[in-house]
Amino acid sequence: MKRTANQSVEVITDILCDACGASVVPDFQKEHHDNLNDFSEYGKLNASYGYGSNHDGDSFHFDLCESCFKELVKKVKSMRASNVQGA
Ligand SMILES: [Zn+2]
């Protein structure tokens, strides 16, 4: 005999870019998966600061679509380029 229970489980149905609001999940992924709990093929920006730093224990998490992530990469590259020139 099997005992059953109706449990509601929270599933991820979409992941939106924190910069532009677009979905970071390709349409075919959404069509072929019941949930996106394991989906990890997108840009993520994480930071956590320990005590004693300027951000004292703060943490940041941003999900980013491909084009916004590309912009971010460009920004980092230009920051690096200007630092190299200034040295
Ligand atoms: Zn975006």
Image (cartoon, rainbow, N blue to C red):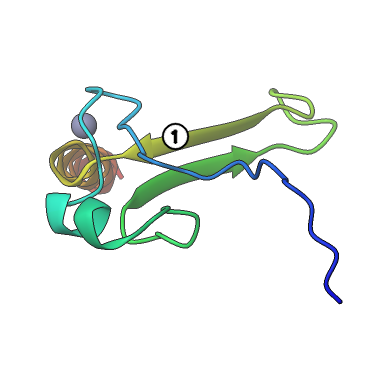
Looking at the image, is 35 positioned above or below residue 74?
below
Query: Residue 43, position in %: x, y?
Result: 33, 50
Q: Outermost residue, bottom direction?
A: 1
Q: Tell me the element at label 1.
A: strand
- Ligand 1 is found in the corner quadrant, namely top left
* Left or right of 65 in this view: 61: right
> What residue do we see at 79% from left, 59% from top?
4
Query: Residue 46, position in %: x, y?
Result: 53, 43
The image quarter in which residue 29 lies: bottom left
Mark 1: give few (<14), some (14-19) or many (20+) Cα within 10 Å.
Answer: few
The image quarter in which residue 48 lies: top right
The image quarter in which residue 71 lies: top left
* Left or right of 48 in this view: 39: left
Question: Would you name the residue on which mark 1 appears?
Answer: 62
Quadrant where the C terminus sits is: top left
Q: How many numbered circles are shown?
A: 1
> What residue do we see at 32% from left, 32% from top?
16
Query: Residue 26, position in %: x, y?
Result: 17, 52
Relative depth, front residue between 81 and 77: 77
Looking at the image, is 79 positioned above or below residue 5?
above
* Left or right of 46 in this view: 44: left
Q: Amino acid at mark 1?
A: Phe
Q: Outermost residue, front direction?
A: 1
> What residue do we see at 23% from left, 41% from top?
65
Query: Residue 11, position in %: x, y?
Result: 53, 45
Relative depth, front residue between 7 and 20: 7
Looking at the image, is 5 positioned above or below residue 71?
below
